[in-house]
Amino acid sequence: MSERGAIRRSGEDWISFLPDPLLCQILSDLPTKNAVTTSVLSKKWRTLWLSIPILDLDIDDFPDYTTFTSFVSRFLDFSKESCLHKLKLAFTRHDDDDPSLLAWWIETAVLRKIQHLEIDCRMSFTCEMIPLSLYLCETLVSLRLYFVALPSFESLSLPNLKVMHMEENLYADDEVLQKLISSCTVLESLTVVRNVDETVKVLRVRSKTLNSLKLVLYSSKSWYNDDSDDWEVLIDAPRLNYLSLEDDQSVSFVISNVASSAKVEIDVSFNVNDIWDMDESIEKFSAVGKMLDGLSSARDMTISGTTLKIISHYMSFELVPCFPNMIRLQTKLYTTDMLPNFLESFPILQSLVLKLEGVRYSDTMWFSFVPKCLQTSLEYVEMTRPNCGAGIEMIRKLVKYLLENSVVLKKFTLRLECDGKEQESNVVKELMRFRRCSSSCVINFVRLEDDVCIFQHPY
């Protein structure tokens, strides 16, 4: 029997006889720091990890900056001719560190036909360390930059970039980010996270290929407040299927196109400090109307409580535009009197998810008005109320209204945190007494504390 056969038969180290390309593929699925530990297995494994096409390192895994840079340089210098599919580095550079190292690493990665690059400079905002050749890389598919300073560009071309994530970077001017986005002719997914310390006040996103967009701007993360009305977002992306806006600073959102099947998540405040004492200016309401018009073709929408408060003020003066494709709506509700009129804008709504927290109940007689979706399309309702306490009467009237007027309702789920067993029992009794307009409606009462369904009642 051969030596190899004996080893296989005894069950010892059979994996070492696999072809090197297959072993490299296995190591590629491990974090780099774990792949390196295989070098102690045998002489064969000593340098095998250096041939994997992925380098994923965090400076926190090293005792100091020098050890980190030495390790990265050795890896990249080992096989300059082979392809490097992914380079991911997270580190902090100090003033006395060599600024040319990262530039050399990225230059090497570009030459080795890098496909996925992620650089996290940990608040050091490096500019001179990012070579301009990166922004002309023809093989790059995914680019993620954190705390990097981007200069003005004379030329840009990223013909294969599909995913771009830009988080809290510094830009030479507003045009830099706009040009970078426009240079990506096949871009599919874009995330931009900004704060008010940055220079990009007017963010323009124009793309014919983009289908996923997430924009985040938090003024609360800044050390100073900017009360100016200079912050704007303009989006023109006709293939957009997913849009997420989290922004407490911008005063205007102009959305030219979203796909008819789009899912949108909206948490914006139009730079309004006190929602309940909102300035009833024409400019503010005009901005709200423009945003709603731009989203009106969406199919699935989640609205934050803050944004819905502003919309409720807007509804005192203007009608919410029709959302003819909307089948699912999720929101946090603060006041009940605006709900029927608001739902009237969603004529084919099928699913409604409401979170009632800190809600204000109004005695306005809106119960006689029934929006079209309740009469023709609404099939699923879920209501959640933590710490219902004194709000139980408001909940009772709202549940009663929805059950008695939803003609095709199939499932109604009420998730409550009750004040003891007595209140819980009273809720169950109320649910059993309510008349249901839909004969096929099933009611679930879920105890919010442990997410246990304690009552289910098919009619």
Image (cartoon, helix red, strand yellow):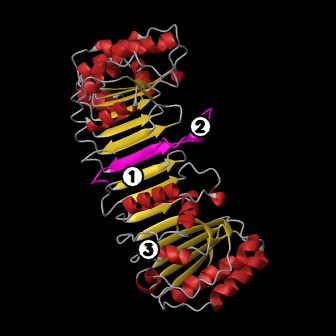
Query: For the residue marked with disc 1, what is the amino acid?
Result: Val
Q: How far apart are marks 1 and 2 (CA)?
A: 24 Å
Q: Nearer the viewer, mark 3 or mark 2?
A: 3
Residue on which the image places disc 1: 254
The residue tagged with tag 1: helix, strand or loop? strand
Specify the label residue 345 is tagged with.
3
Q: Can residue 422 be seen in this view?
A: yes
Mark closest to the chain's N terminus, 3 or 1: 1
Q: Distance between the residues labelled 3 and 2?
A: 35 Å
Instruction: State the residue in front, 326 or 382.
Output: 326
Query: For the residue marked with disc 3, what is the amino acid?
Result: Ser
Seen in the picture, residue 130 relative to 192 is either above or below; the reply is above
Residue beneath the point at 61% across and 85% down: 400
Residue beneath the point at 27% across and 54% down: 238
Q: Residues within 10 Å of mark 2 (few under 14, many from 20)?
A: few
The residue tagged with tag 3: helix, strand or loop? loop
Q: Residue 402 location, x and y as percent?
A: 55, 82
Label 3–label 2 contact, CB within 8 A: no
Instruction: State the residue in front, 200 or 42.
Output: 200
Q: Residues within 10 Å of mark 3 (few under 14, many from 20)?
A: many
The residue tagged with tag 2: helix, strand or loop? helix
Q: Residue 187 location, x and y as percent?
A: 27, 42
- Stretch in magenta: 212-240
Residue on which the image places disc 2: 221
Q: In which quarter of the image is residue 451?
A: bottom right
Q: In this view, does 241 lie to the left or right of 168?
A: left
Q: Residue 272 location, x and y as percent?
A: 59, 51
223 in magenta: yes
Mark closest to the chain's N terminus, 1 or 2: 2
Question: Which quarter of the rendering shows the C terminus?
Answer: bottom right
Q: Residue 323 location, x and y as percent?
A: 39, 69
Instruction: State the residue in front, 106 or 327.
Output: 327
